[in-house]
Amino acid sequence: MQPQADFTLELTQLSAQAVKALAPSFASLPKTDHADGQYRLRRYSSITLGPKGINHLASHQFVQSEEINHFQGDVVRQFEELQEHIINSDALLEMCEIFKQANHLSDQQIIDIHQMRITAIYDQTKVSPEGIHQDGFDHIAMIGIDRHNISGGELLIYNSNKEAPFLHKVLTSGEVALLDDHRLWHNATPISLINKSEAGHMDVFVLTAKDL
C-alpha cells in the first residue's frame, strides 16, 4: 500500500530563486469565458514526476462535481496549458518535488497544476467564489508567489464547514501550504485594492493529486 502523508496541515517554503523564475509568467495568464474567467486568470496542466523529471501529460478538461463545487460544479472547463518554458524549468520542478515528497506520491501519480492570478476588479473581489469547500482530492498545496497593491486574500483553514476557521494566513512569497483535503476545509478572504488608481493582483499556484 502506498504510504500516506503524515500531516494534516504543513507550511514550508519555495526558494527565492524559484519564485523569481516563476513570477514573470503570471503576467501572460489568459482570461476565459467561465463564470470567474474575467478576474481569475488561469493556466492548467497535468504532469507526472519521475526520476527523469517532469512528464507533461496531454491536455484535458477540468470538471468538479456540483457536490464539491457549488459555484461551477458539473461545468466542463478548458484552460490553456502552462507555458513550456515553465513546465521545463528547475523552479517548477522544485515546487512539484516539494509536493511529491511531502505527500509520498509515486512516480505514476498525476499532479494537476493550476497557475492563477486573481485580479482585484471589484471593491471586494472573491478569491474563492465557492466559499468554504473541499476540492475532492487527496492532496492539495497552495503556493503564494506574488501580491501587488492588495489587502485581504488570507487563506482560511477549517476543521469543518460548520466551524470558524482555526487559521488565517496570508501566503507570503514562496510560502507553501500543504493540507489534507479529507480532514480540512478551506476558503479565502476577498481582496481589495490599496491604491484604487493602480491595478492589484494575487498570484498563486494550486497543486492537487489523487491516490492511486
Image (spheres, grey):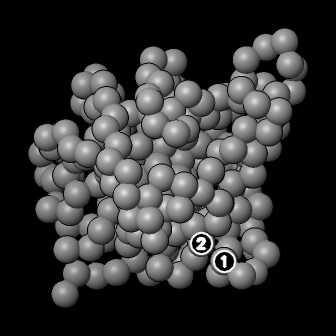
Type of amino acid under label 2: Trp
In the rendered image, the quadrant that contains the C terminus is: bottom left
Image point (30%, 68%), residue name:
210
Q: Which mark is residue 186?
A: none
Q: Quadrant of residue 124?
A: top right
Within 10 Å of the Cα at label 1, are there few (<14), some (14-19), or many (20+) other Cα atoms? some
As helix, strand or loop, the secondary structure at mark 1 comes to: loop
Within 10 Å of the Cα at label 2, are there few (<14), some (14-19), or many (20+) other Cα atoms? many
Residue mark closest to the camera, 2 vs 1: 1
Residue that carries the numbered disc 2 in the rendered image: 185
Type of amino acid under label 1: Asn
190 left or right of 39 in image? right
Q: Is residue 106 visible?
A: yes
Q: Is residue 91 above or below residue 178?
A: above
Q: Is residue 164 above or below residue 16?
A: below
In the rendered image, the quadrant that contains the N terminus is: bottom left
The front one of 128 and 34 is 34
Q: Is residue 102 visible?
A: no
